[in-house]
Image: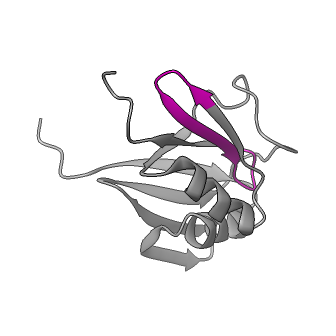
Amino acid sequence: MKFTMAGIILFTENYEKCVAFYRWALELEILHVIDRPGERLTTFLLGDIYLMVESGGTASDGAKTIKQNPTKFRFNVPDVRETSAALRNKGINVQVFEHTWGITAEFADPDGNLCALRSDTGFGD
């Protein structure tokens, strides 16, 4: 098979808040927007894939459990602490964790979907 691009569709209850989160807080580039009766979606460039945010999901108060949503978005960054500080400055609750192989940080989007940062270093170490 030859795929030209791959993507993830994220169904959200708080569509506008989630779009603002991925655009403003994570600074993802918008590829396209559809906003017409019965169809609202925003597609962001997410590395070599896309993230399509649509309405129709279910939000949670706070971060969702793995049972509620068994996935997590992980974003590799050059400096987890610096990126975490930038997210905190935007009002996002971020927890940083040190591991023997690197650093991660965890936070949630407005629907409670889990997100994480990971240091670029540590792969294969």
Asked if residue 59 is positioned above or below residue 41 in the image, the reply reads above
| Residue 99, position as x, y percentages in the image | 56, 24
- 71 relative position to 92: left or right: left
Secondary structure, magenta segment, majority class? strand
Based on the displayed image, in which of its 4 quarters is residue 22 positioned?
A: bottom right
Residue sitting at 88 percent across and 45 percent down?
61
- Report the number of discs: 0
What is the span of residues highlighted in magenta in the rendered image? 98-112
- 42 relative position to 85: left or right: left
| Residue 120, position as x, y percentages in the image | 38, 42
Q: Is 101 part of what is drawn in magenta?
A: yes
Q: Say which of 14 and 21 sits in front.
A: 21
Residue sitting at 57 percent across and 32 percent down?
71
Inspect this view and state whether residue 113 appears: no
Which residue is most to the right? 61
Q: Say which of 71 and 56 sits in front.
A: 71
Q: Is 56 part of what is drawn in magenta?
A: no
Q: Quadrant of the C terminus?
A: top left
| Residue 38, position as x, y percentages in the image | 62, 68
- 33 relative position to 62: left or right: left
Asked if residue 101 is positioned above or below residue 55 in the image, the reply reads above
Which residue is most to the left? 2
